[in-house]
Image (tube, helix red, strand yellow):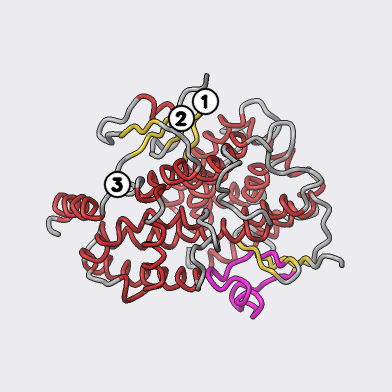
Amino acid sequence: MADEVILLDYWPSPFGIRARIALREKGVEFECREENLRDKSPLLLQMNPVHKKIPVLIHNGKPVCESMNVVQYIDEVWSDRNPILPSDPYQRAQARFWVDFVDTKLLKPADQLWQTKGEEQETAKKEYIEALKILESELGDKPYFGGDTFGFLDIAMTGYYSWFEASEKLANFSIEPECPILMASAKRCLQRESVVKSLHDSEKILELAYKLRKEYGV
Amino acid sequence: MANKPILLDYWPSMFGMRARVALREKGVDFEYREEDFSNKSALLLQSNPVHKKIPVLVHNGKPVCESLNVVQYVDEAWPDKNPFFPSDPYGRSQARFWADFVDKKFTEAQVKIWMKKGEEQEAGKKEFIEALKILESELGDKPYFGGDSFGYVDISLITFYSWFQAYEKFGNISIEAESPKLVAWGKRCMEKESVSKSLPESEKIVGYVAEFRKNNLGSE
């Protein structure tokens, strides 16, 4: 029986993109269904009643929610190719630790970069760069956070990389001079086929951010 | 010869307790070290420079931080006894999802009950009861969240059980009335030695919270 793989998604989402990338890294055929977050589909509400958020991976009718949970699930189901997590328990713990860091310390300032202005935005910029610098130190001289291979933390970060250009324009700053090594790794990730196929035009993301800022009166 | 794993911990922390339960479930002999937050040890600052928080498990000289991360690491480093996860990927993703729910929604709600008062506390109570009901619904008629066996979600939540009396006293709620199945589950888990040895007595937590509220909120 062929697998049925549906992804409930939202095109600019840095979380949705993680799921898309993971599926493509594994060469899995899937149907991407775009959600309107202001008018969520009955399927989304039924499949993720607790959080009502995307991404939701529906595999043969069963839902998996929370982006990095989805990525790990994909890694475990399609375990015969392109492993995303390392096999050593300590390395896995490190990967999970840094993904948690990213989704706690980087997430809030990343959101505030496009949601705020003035002093609030300046503070967000500082915290954002600070978090990126800590990550750059963790990267060291490895091509990817996963070492020689594109892995769990790289996939998590690519969500944020996909918003780098838009964030820089919105908050008027440049990431490369602050974190050149991280930026080099980011560019490497953004060129991967699975990422290129999953990415949307930075211009479109920027356009959306401007539109939302206007709506929120920022 | 490998040294005993060291757990840097703090007795009332429900996050530290998770690591204790996990290690005991696996029958791991470990060294427990109490941290003083007003004077954090060199080992803590060196092992967890990013967050400077407990629990930290130092195993073979290498640190593992963040409580649920420690629990997963313990499961993977000592895989031959009492697995915390089912073997099928879907069951595993469900376990991770619910532990994450405990870590976000449930944790944020309970903290408002014991650390706040007035309107903030009231808001926290509402969220807490809502989260309890969602968890109780997920538990259903199973003996444990893991089904027939005590697992990852059980470990993530049971440590808050030692705080139930404090939530009831300072939040003026009855957890039994709101979620009887969950309380029954708590009592069932407490029958396990790994749990009862790892959780402090509820009265001690009540005393801890009373002290905190006196010092920080000016009243109980």
Instruction: Say whether residue B49 is magenta.
Output: no
Residue A74 sits above or below residue A177 on the image: below
Q: Amino acid at mark 1?
A: Asn
Residue A199 bears which disc, if any? none
Chain of the residue where label 2 is placed in the rendered structure: B
Marks 3 and 2 sit apart, C-alpha to C-alpha, by 21 Å
Helix, strand or loop at disc 2?
Answer: loop
Marks 1 and 2 sit apart, C-alpha to C-alpha, by 7 Å
| Comparing labels 3 and 2, the label whose residue is closer to the camera | 2
Q: Quadrant of residue B202?
A: bottom left
Task: Residue B154: give x, y in percent of width and height.
Answer: 47, 57
Whether residues under marks 1 and 2 lie with C-beta atoms below 8 angstroms apart, the answer is yes
Taking depth in this image into account, of B151 and A90 the one nearest to the observer is B151
Residue B12 bears which disc, if any? 3
Residue farthest to the right?
A: A1
Mark positioned earlier in the residue sequence (3 or 1)? 3
- The residue labelled by disc 1 is B60
Task: Residue B204: give x, y in percent of width and height.
Answer: 21, 50
Mark positioned earlier in the residue sequence (1 or 2)? 2
Residue A177 appears in the picture as rendered: no
- Give the left or right position of residue A46, taking residue B140 as reference: right
Residue B54 sits above or below residue A169 on the image: above
Task: Residue B113: give x, y in percent of width and height.
Answer: 28, 62
Q: Amino acid at mark 2?
A: Pro
Q: Amino acid at mark 3?
A: Pro
